[in-house]
């Protein structure tokens, strides 16, 4: 039987400390200037930022847009250091082709991997505990091809790679966690934007259901609190929401091209609540009040649903 350990104990054991979602004010010169105008805790700007990227030119390159949103945030080198083991968490849980907007676009994955490698990452790993058969998911979604072209590790989920850990959530306590995320130096969350029959939407915070094992059907009971409990445990360095095309109906598994809307957008942030808030508003016309897990994420301090408290950037190609 696996010994019960906390995430902190595991990190100490491997000699790594995963950074939180907050980036220091000195890291980005342009971002830190807003702090001089802070007054009260309620009005004080967060050390957060968000980049909204859009492909406007016909035939624009998804990989080029991905690079541009990272450039706007100061470059991947601000987040990834030489020798880092980086784990990417795309949504590749369904064996559906990329054009159906059910999974993270392979060109987005490929661009992020290349940026990490250029920044000196020792290893880049792609991990998701898929719903459909993993081998089929990896092949159909394009993830296997990305791994082959870039040399990234594609991690197949196995029961031996699930470690019981204390999530210290408001609802979830001990749960099997997919170990690549525990062992990583840096984590980048890379969801696709789509509707969901139970949680209204699936964006960044919801994507962490693919980071655990166990009876995941139980997570759908009080799903919004479960989403936030998982999000507060994983705490990625960055969230990159793939909205190059979105699923507008019959989520999360989709399967009908008529449910897909091409939006040509990417949203990058160090604040997971803000990333989901902006995506919900711009892509689906939803407010935080429409999406309970966004409200809960704000309530429990995972980030801010008040976008005015963040530094915002827009880029286009």
Image (tube, rainbow, N blue to C red):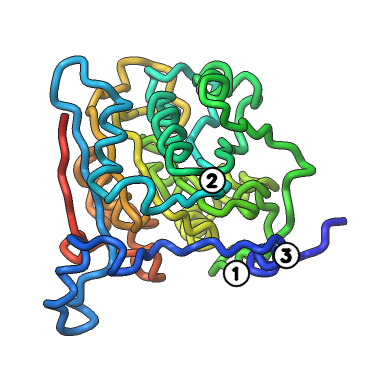
Of mark 1 and mark 2, the one earlier in the sequence is: 2
State whether residue 25 appears in this view. Answer: yes
Q: Which residue is drawn at 61% across and 31% down?
A: 154
Q: Residue at x 28, y 28 (%)?
A: 64
**Residue 162 position in % (x across, y down):** 72, 48
Above or below for 68 versus 287: above
Say what secondary structure mark 1 lies in: loop
Say what secondary structure mark 2 lies in: strand
Q: In which quarter of the image is residue 308?
A: bottom left
Q: Residue at x 82, y 62 (%)?
A: 3
Give 266 or 210, whichever is nearer the viewer: 266
Q: Are marks 3 and 2 in contact (CB under 8 Å)?
A: no
Give 38 or 171, whichever is nearer the viewer: 38
Give 8 or 279, whichever is nearer the viewer: 8
Residues at marks 3 and 2, CA–CA distance in whole angstroms: 18 Å
Disc 3 target residue: 13
Q: On the picture, is 51 further left or further right than 118?
A: left
Q: In which quarter of the image is residue 254?
A: top left
Above or below for 149 versus 15: above
Mark 2 surroundings within 10 Å by alpha-carbon count, few (fewer than 14), some (14 through 19), many (20 or more): many
Say what secondary structure mark 3 lies in: helix
Of mark 3 and mark 2, the one earlier in the sequence is: 3
Above or below for 209 versus 114: below
Disc 2 target residue: 86
Mark 3 surroundings within 10 Å by alpha-carbon count, few (fewer than 14), some (14 through 19), many (20 or more): few
Residues at marks 3 and 1, CA–CA distance in whole angstroms: 19 Å
Q: Which residue is drawn at 19% across and 42% down?
A: 282
Q: On the picture, is 283 further left or further right than 298?
A: left
Q: On the picture, is 154 further left or further right than 118?
A: right
Disc 1 target residue: 168
**Closer to the camera: disc 3 or disc 1?**
3
**Residue 155 position in % (x across, y down):** 65, 34
């Amino acid at each position: 039987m696996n010994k019960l350990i906390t995430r902190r104990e595991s990190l100490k054991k491997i000699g790594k400390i995963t950074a939180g979602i907050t980036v220091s004010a000195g890291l980005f010169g342009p971002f830190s200037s807003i702090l001089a105008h802070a007054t009260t805790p309620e009005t004080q700007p967060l050390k957060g930022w968000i980049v909204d990227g859009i492909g406007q030119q016909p035939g624009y390159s998804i990989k080029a847009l991905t690079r541009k949103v990272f450039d706007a945030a100061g470059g991947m080198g601000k987040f990834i250091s030489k020798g880092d083991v980086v784990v990417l968490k795309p949504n590749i849980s369904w064996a559906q082709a990329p054009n159906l907007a059910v999974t993270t676009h392979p060109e987005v994955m490929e661009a992020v991997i290349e940026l990490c490698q250029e920044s000196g990452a020792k290893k880049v790993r792609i991990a998701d505990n898929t719903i459909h058969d993993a081998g089929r998911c990896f092949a159909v979604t394009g993830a296997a091809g990305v791994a082959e072209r870039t040399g990234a590790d594609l991690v197949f989920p196995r029961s031996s790679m699930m470690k019981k850990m204390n999530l210290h959530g408001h609802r979830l306590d001990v749960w099997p966690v997919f170990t690549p995320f525990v062992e990583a130096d840096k984590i980048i969350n890379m969801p696709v934007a789509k509707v969901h029959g139970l949680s209204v939407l699936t964006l960044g915070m919801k994507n962490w259901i693919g980071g655990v094992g166990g009876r995941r059907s139980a997570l759908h009971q009080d799903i919004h609190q479960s989403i936030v409990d998982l999000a507060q445990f994983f705490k990625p360095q960055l969230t990159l929401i793939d909205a190059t095309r979105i699923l507008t109906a019959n989520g999360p598994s989709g399967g009908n091209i008529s449910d897909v809307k091409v939006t040509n957008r990417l949203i990058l942030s160090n604040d997971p609540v803000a990333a989901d808030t902006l995506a919900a508003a711009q892509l689906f016309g939803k407010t935080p009040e429409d999406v309970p897990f966004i409200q809960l994420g704000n309530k429990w301090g995972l980030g801010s649903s008040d976008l005015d408290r963040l530094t915002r950037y827009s880029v286009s190609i």
